[in-house]
Amino acid sequence: MWDYTDKVKEHFQNPRNVGEVEDAEGVAEVGSMSCGDALKLTFKTDKKGKITDAKFKTFGCASAIASSSALTEMIKGKTIEEAEKISNEDIADYLGGLPKEKMHCSVLGQQALEQAIAHYKGEAVAEKEGEIVCECFGITDKEIETAIRENNLSTIEDVINYTKAGGGCENCHGAILEIIQKVRGEEKAPAPPKMSNMQKIKKIEETIANEISPSLKQDGGNVELVDVVGNRVLVKMQGSCAVCKASQQTLKNFVEAKLREMVWPDLVVEEVAP
Amino acid sequence: MKTIYLDNNATTQVAPEVLEEMTPYFHDLYGNPSSAHTFGGQMGKKIREARENAALLLGVEPGEILFTSCGSESDNAAIRSALELNPDKRHIVTSRVEHPAIKSYCEHLANNGYRITQIPVDKDGNLDVAAYEESLTPDTAIATVMWGNNETGVVFPVEQLATLAKDRGILFHSDGVQVAGKIPINMKESQVDMLSLSGHKLHAPKGVGILYIRKGVPFSPFIIGGHQEMGRRGGTENTAGIIGLGKACQLALANMEDENTRVKDLRDRLETEILKRIPKTRVNGGEAQRLPNTSNISFEFIEGEAILLQMDSYGICASSGSACTSGSLQPSHVLRAMGVPFTMAHGSIRFSLSIYNTAEEIDFVIETMPPIIEKLRALSPFWEGNARSCGADKMPF
């Protein structure tokens, strides 16, 4: 059974603002019945552009219903400009959090809001931009990219939880991984900040402890920092890594890549003899 | 709030008689049956009794009963043994609607070089027997097809499938977890080589199961250790669990009649009334031969997890084949194999009864379901003017 917050349960049992606003100015329909979630959002505004009424209809699980109910409560009384700033994280936060497997319910709410505002402004509802990556749920590369950026996602599992992409036949997992790597690549592009040697070593230690060791330990291995000489990071492989034939690949493709990404782009990782 | 438990295909309550039978074996009579002393040795007699009771339920010899830890272990052990004893054969025949204990294990084997043929089912959930027959080849190490489906209750013609396999010299195993105690089984008249059972589905506790292995069928142990279970499964016996399961098998035999008359009537009444009172509903597998206790009903335009949580607030326990319930994004593989449209599969609820359910409970559920469904449909964008329901009205149901 899902671990829902009391607020999610309360909004599910007593959803606010159910229905359709008459003479709505903003209207959006997102999702579909085959996906398992669909939401129709309607709202209208006063002369000053403040949202005076908002209503929803949702097909979906408890968290989809609660997210929709929360969304209508959140936008009522807000100006369009204020409403535009609401993210899926905000919807989840309003409910005291959602299980990570259910984050796509908050994304659905945010998408409906975005579309309804576009409709209100008279903007043509944008054709789905980009290429479909996930055939099962009809999710495009652009949608996946946005979700990765906005929610700082780093694994395929994250992408499935937030967008559903990849949750069906799994054939698109390779393509999703490429998108993750692409977005992650952009992030490290900005010029790295200046860093003292002490700061650098501290950051390397932290990255190994928090980002690298946990993954290696899952496979019974580990890596220990021996020394940092300029941009040379000297490490010792431990456990199963010490005897693994693929350890050089792990060192370059994972340990070095991660340190370059998180600490300093010019780092070179070298293994020292045990 | 009183709990109304209609989720007996998930697990069942331990029968009071079973609990009573087991209790001394935790505290007073805790010896190890393998010990040389009288204190431990007396456990052997009770295990023998349990084996005899299990054998009676299946119509077999006690020596053909192997006690395991659960249905999944029995399923895995049967397939594994067949592969180990036929190292040159690389093909397995199974169905598309198996329990994960078979399905996931076969997928695992597929990743390790085995060829798996999953036989499809039709819209009523019936197995394509012709496709099954065609799929059996000299390379087939084992055919494993479930007896009764856990989600829909649809019963497969296992005897016919076993005979087809036997004629070609192929081992036949069946996951019988859902059928034990619900339909009469006489393995003496059968060609089934191995059959899996689970204790907690027939009012014994969790953590004990059975693998029936026909006399003369070679078996290679899954757990290698001590000489327990005639050397076919190492590990100190779960004495209390086994003794409980023996009692449960005895009760199941005695209650079979009740299961197929009173319980079946309750199920039929629940189903008929729900369909009568709530529009846009259908029974998945309703046209097929089914277990007497199971009903899988789809409520169109709403989602299963939401239905379950509403039912939960009235103390009614059931299951759903919706994607959201399972934690995956795809609805039930069983319903999809039957071609149930997504729109129906997402809103499916499985009711599964036991001998402990009463007419009052069923009446309460019959009264409670319509307002629950109405409440959720009022929230659904597809309910009003359901002409624009993704073409759902054009579906052949």
Image (cartoon, rainbow, N blue to C red):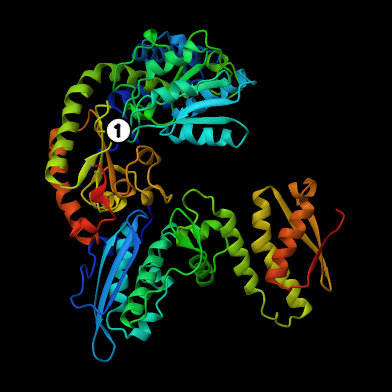
Q: Is residue A251 left or right of residue A144?
A: right
Label 1, residues with CA under 10 Å away: few <14, some 14-19, many ≥20:
some
Q: Who's the residue at 61% across and 61% down the image?
A: A178
Position above or below: B240 against B150: above
Position above or below: B332 against B13: below
Q: Quadrant of the C terminus of chain B?
A: top left
User: Is residue B312 among the parts visible in the rendering?
Assistant: no
Position above or below: A89 against B55: below
Image location of residue B396, percent across then percent down: 25, 42
**Quadrant in the rendering for residue B100:** top left
Image location of residue B22, percent across then percent down: 37, 24
Of residue B50 and residue A108, the one placed in the foreground of this image is A108
Of residue B317 and residue A118, the one placed in the foreground of this image is A118
Q: Amino acid at mark 1?
A: Asp
Of residue B373 and residue A118, the one placed in the foreground of this image is A118
Image location of residue A195, percent across then percent down: 74, 80
User: Is residue B326 among the parts visible in the rendering?
Assistant: yes
Chain at numbered mark 1: B
Position above or below: A49 against B61: below
Secondary structure under tag 1 reads loop
Q: Who's the residue at 43% across and 49% down the image?
A: B328
Q: Which residue is mark 1?
A: B124
**Quadrant in the rendering for residue B123:** top left
Image location of residue A137, percent across then percent down: 43, 56
Number of marks in the rendered image: 1
**Quadrant in the rendering for residue B223:** top right
Q: Is residue A237 left or right of residue A160?
A: right
Of residue B46 and residue A184, the one placed in the foreground of this image is A184
Q: Who's the residue at 47% across and 53% down the image?
A: A167
Q: Is residue A142 left or right of residue A273?
A: left
